Amino acid sequence: MRVRISYSVDLENVPSECARMLHDALEQIEEVKEEISDLVRQLDDDKAQLWIVKDKIDSSRKNLARLDLVLADNDMILEGYFKAKEPEVEDVSEG
């Protein structure tokens, strides 16, 4: 189950907070890359237990899905950041 956790940071710190989140995601990407490289080596080995490989593929897919959620979160955060940085446009009506 996915839950939303919110906390506040100063507006000027939003980009660096996104960078921190994306840095963490990069570390996870490296882990997934290593998992997939290991899967390729196992599949190249005639003695590989394919049911284990299949389970590891599923695990890698789930890790990638979690990474996609981090990217989606950052997209939404930056969308809100840009909206907050836009100057307010006042409705000027001619009378």
Image (spheres, rainbow, N blue to C red):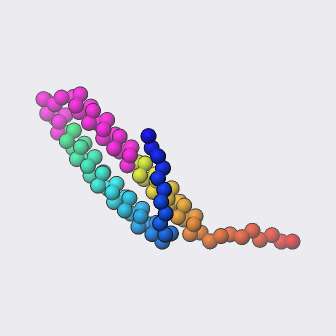
Q: Residue at x 17, y 39 (%)?
A: 41
Q: Is residue 75 visible?
A: no
Where in the figure is residue 36, as x and y percent of width and height? 25, 42
Name the one closer to the observer, 36 or 77. 77
Instruction: Judge whether 1 appears above or below 95 on screen.
Output: above
Instruction: Judge whether 4 appears above or below 41 on screen.
Output: below
Horizontal side, residue 64 vs residue 56: left or right: right
In which quadrant is the C terminus drawn? bottom right
In which quadrant is the N terminus drawn? top left
Where in the figure is residue 58, as x and y percent of width and height? 31, 35
Q: Is residue 60 magenta?
A: yes
Q: Residue at x 17, y 36 (%)?
A: 42
Q: Is residue 40 magenta?
A: no
Horizontal side, residue 41 vs residue 73: left or right: left
Image quadrant in which you'd find residue 53: top left
Horizontal side, residue 25 vs residue 69: left or right: left
Image quadrant in which you'd find residue 22: bottom left
Horizontal side, residue 9 vs residue 25: left or right: right
Q: Residue at x 30, y 51 (%)?
A: 28
Q: Is residue 11 visible?
A: yes
Main secondary structure found in the magenta portion: helix
Span shown in magenta: 41-67
Q: Residue at x 42, y 53 (%)?
A: 71
Where in the figure is residue 31, as x and y percent of width and height? 26, 49
Residue furthest to the right in view is 95
Where in the figure is residue 81, as x and y percent of width and height? 52, 64
